[in-house]
Image (cartoon, rainbow, N blue to C red):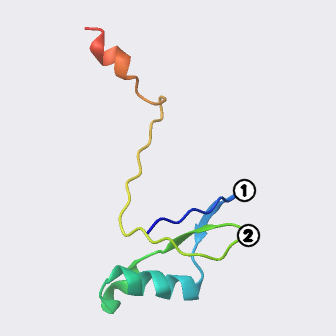
Amino acid sequence: MKMKTIFETMTIDLADSSQSVEILQLSGIDESRWDRIKCLALKSGEVDSLVACTSYSIRAYPNGFPSTTSSRAM
């Protein structure tokens, strides 16, 4: 199945309580651990939908994004 929705703007925000329950149920995480989890939602003012991601990585580059060409120059 393929689905496509175009959103003009989106923001990342804490999920409201009903979204959190839906995300947590979908994730299969044991209910005894729910109180340790912060659920985030991509929100837009247009369409009410749900996309769940149960894992993510955050990378920070305080000195800018590393260049791949600098490591090849040697």
Figure quadrant of the C terminus: top left
Give the answer, above or below, for where 11 lies relative to 31: above
**Residue at the spot x=35%, y=22% of the render?**
68
| Rendering coords of residue 34 (x, y %) | 39, 85
Answer whether residue 1 is visible to the viewer in this image.
Answer: yes
Res 41 label: none
- Residue found at the very far top of the displayed protein: 74
Give the answer, above or below, for where 39 lies relative to 60: below
Task: Identify the residue position indicated by label 2 in the image.
Answer: 46
Res 8 label: 1
Q: Regarding mark 1 in the picture, which secondary structure is present there?
A: loop
Figure quadrant of the N terminus: bottom left
Q: Regarding mark 2 in the picture, which secondary structure is present there?
A: loop
Give the answer, above or below, for where 31 lies relative to 42: below
Between 12 and 5, the one nearer to me in the picture: 5
| Rendering coords of residue 21 (x, y %) | 48, 88
